């Protein structure tokens, strides 16, 4: 059974996990979001438990007729099967996010400019997610500054690794 709050079950590569705050509710599994004894979304439960945009995303998911068991898939491959290659790419992406955003040195650099402060209110899954947030929320100047600063941090990281 798929846990509504812990598993990454939404069909969106950017927002594949519920981010709405968990309310006091009997909803814990995806099946709890259906009308009883059906596989039809209970729109009232969706609206009660999720942000509007999440409720709309969930309501658009086509549900199987019930003849197949629910299963978890690896979201980083087209066929949903785990591969070492996809895991390696994921880890490389994590390293990039850590090196350019999360490590102490990078945090010091980014926090020096209060214009980037709003970006610290959210946790990002990848550097790509972070860059997307910068491009959506920041001015053109800030986007250029972000890219230049990230490039400088990467160059400095590479110089340190060469020593």
Image (cartoon, helix red, strand yellow):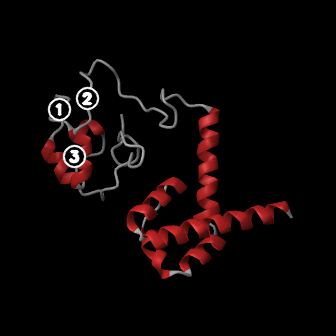
Horizontal side of 36 relative to 18 (left or right) equals left
How far across and down, in percent of the image, does residue 98 sit?
61, 60
Horizontal side of 61 relative to 73 (left or right) equals left
Read off the residue under disc 1. Answer: 40
**Along the viewing direction, whichever of 18 and 124 lies nearer the viewer:** 124
Q: Are marks 1 and 3 in contact (CB under 8 Å)?
A: no
- Which of pointers 2 and 3 lies earlier in the amino acid sequence? 3
At 27% from the left and 50% from the top, the residue drawn is: 54
Foreground mark, 1 or 3, reads: 3
Read off the residue under disc 2. Answer: 63
Report the quarter where the C terminus lies. bottom right
Report the quarter where the N terminus lies. top left
Q: Are marks 2 and 1 in contact (CB under 8 Å)?
A: yes
Foreground mark, 2 or 3, reads: 3
- Which of pointers 1 and 3 lies earlier in the amino acid sequence? 1
**Along the viewing direction, whichever of 158 and 3 lies nearer the viewer:** 158
- Give the label on residue 56, or none: 3
């Amino acid at each position: 059974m798929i846990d509504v709050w812990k598993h990454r079950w939404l069909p969106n590569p950017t927002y594949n996990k519920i981010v709405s705050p968990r309310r006091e509710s009997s909803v814990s599994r995806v099946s709890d979001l259906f009308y009883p004894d059906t596989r039809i979304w209970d729109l009232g439960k969706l609206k009660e438990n999720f942000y509007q945009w999440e409720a709309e995303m969930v309501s658009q998911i086509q549900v199987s007729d019930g003849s197949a068991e629910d299963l978890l898939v690896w979201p980083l491959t087209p066929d949903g099967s785990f591969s070492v290659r996809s895991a390696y790419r994921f880890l490389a992406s994590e390293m990039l996010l850590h090196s350019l955003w999360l490590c102490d040195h990078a945090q010091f650099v980014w926090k020096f400019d209060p214009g980037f402060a709003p970006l610290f209110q959210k946790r990002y899954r990848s550097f790509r997610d972070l860059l997307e947030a910068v491009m959506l929320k920041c001015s053109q100047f800030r986007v250029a500054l972000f890219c230049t600063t990230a490039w400088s941090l990467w160059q400095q990281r590479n110089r340190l690794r060469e020593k």
